[in-house]
Structures are given as structure tokens and as C-alpha cells.
Image (tube, grey):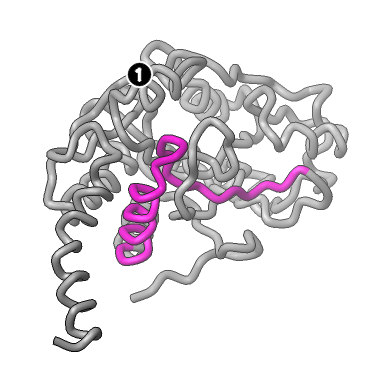
Amino acid sequence: MTAWVKGLALACALLPGMAAAQMAELVSQSALRVCADPANDPMSTEAGTGFENEIAELLADRLEKPVEYTWFPMATGFVRRTLGEKRCDVIIGFAQGHEMVQNTNHYMTSIYTMIVPRDGALSDVVTLSDPRLKDKVVGIIAGSPPGTHMARNGLMSKARAYPLFVDRRVQSPATDMLGDLEAGEIDAAVLWGPIGGPLVKRDHPDLKVVPLLNEAGAPKMYYRITMGVRLGEDQWKRQLNSLIRRNQAEIDAILHEAGVPLLNDMGTEAKVLSQ
């Protein structure tokens, strides 16, 4: 037997063991175990109506496994009490570069948006530096990146702040903000696109979502969103990377249908979806 044939035979013999080793990192090999907030509408809900739920179902289908959830509010202790305690194996949506998890490759790039009445006086405003925003009441999630741009443009003195850290089972700052906008209590709302876009598309047809593509200076308004896995689980991360790459068109379709504003990787313009 030639050396090449012997090598091929050895490789074939090792393949099943190699596959098992890839999955051995995970506590469960019989299900896609997802860590999620049960009331993080429109991203994840216990009823399965969020777009992150749909992405989880897509991945589980490709893995030929059911989805199993560990529910925990997206607040202090979320990663530690879910992924950290090995009660689940993946967080579907996590910002790139967070030190508490190991990030997969990103599956979307999105951006903060300004939301205004579709037929109002601000309907064609595209940047926070527009003079027409002076003396207007703009809603903002406290501590979110657009606040720096609003301060730079003199908009914070009349801004209305909504809380960042809440238990979404009993409070929804984004829903409150959009309700106040429709009621005329504020003139514009600034929200993270994957939250504001789907809520407007589903519940607020008289409002318009404007991606903040033209803000000058730091901080940036766009962010790449990944999946989060435990530190050290490199094989599992690579498997998820492969799933994201092979199913990117389907993921994009889910996000687009939900109303998430999608950008190219550089965050400079709207993403052109593949057919």
C-alpha cells in the first residue's frame, strides 16, 4: 500500500472522531440551545415571533436539530447566568468585540436611525446636524451612542431620555418612545435600527425610519452583529461561521422582511440583497 493510500485511509478513519470532537465542546449535541431574552421584542420573544427566533429556527433546520431556549432578561448577569453557566450554547445577537463572549463572524451590519412622522415637517431630515431639529424634542435611549452626536449639535437640552436598562417583561422604552412620537409629545425618535425599524414596520405605518448614515465624527452609528459563544469553543464558532456564510441570503431575507435596516460591511450605504 502506498504512503498516499495509507494517509487517505487514516484520514477517513479519523473523520467520525473529528466530527465528534467538534461537537464535544457543547453540553448538548441533540439540540441548538439558544440563550435569549423572553421579552426582547422585536428581536426575541418567548412566543417565537422575533427575528432572532427565526434565525435560530433557520440554523437549527440546517443542523437538523430542534431549538431549545434558556430564557433570561437581557440585563446585568445575562451572559453569566446563561452562556457562562452552560445552560445554552449560543446568543443569536451580540455586538462585535464584546469581551464576555467569543464572537462569530457578523451576520448583519445595521445602524442607528431617526424616526419621524412620514408626512411631517421633519420628513426629509437625514442628519442630526440639520438646523430644523433645533428646539425640537428628540427622544433618545439614555447612554446610547447617538447621544454624543445630539450633544455636539445642541439637541440635548430639550431631549427626552428613555431608560437603557429595563426588564422588558414590564417596560419597553422603544415602544414608549414611538407612542410619544405619534402622540406629538416628542418630534423625533432616535433608536437602534434593528429595534426601531421592525416596530415601525409592524405597528406605526405613519412613521418613517431614516438611517443615520451621515453623522460626522465619533462614535460610529453602525455596528456589526455577531453570534456569541463561550470563550475557547473554537470548533463551535467555526461551525457557526460556516452556517452564517452558507445561509447569509436566507438570514438577510429574514432581517429585511422584519424591517431591519441592513448596510454593507463598511456601514456606508444600504446593503444590496442577493436574489
Q: Residue at x 59, y 17 (%)?
A: 163
Establish if 204 lies above or below 175.
below
Q: Quadrant of residue 160?
A: top right
The answer to whether residue 138 is magenta is no
Q: Residue at x 51, y 42 (%)?
A: 207
The quarter of the rendered structure image containing the N terminus is bottom left
Q: Residue at x 55, y 25 (%)?
A: 177
Residue toward you, 35 or 131 = 35
Establish if 145 lies above or below 271.
above
Q: Quadrant of residue 145?
A: top right
- Residue 266 placement (x, y as % from top left): 63, 63
Answer left or right for 259 relative to 5: right
User: Helix or strand or loop: what does disc 1 sit on?
Assistant: loop
Residue toward you, 119 or 128 = 128
Establish if 157 lies above or below 248.
above
- Residue 269 placement (x, y as % from top left): 61, 65
Q: Residues within 10 Å of mark 1 (few under 14, many from 20)?
A: some
The residue most toward the top is: 170
Answer left or right for 221 relative to 263: right
Q: Amino acid at mark 1?
A: Phe
The answer to whether residue 244 is magenta is yes
Q: Which residues are magenta?
A: 219-247
- Residue 65 placement (x, y as % from top left): 13, 45
Q: Residue at x 42, y 35 (%)?
A: 230
Q: Which residue is mark 1?
A: 72
Answer left or right for 181 relative to 217: left
Residue toward you, 175 or 90 = 90
- Residue 261 placement (x, y as % from top left): 50, 53
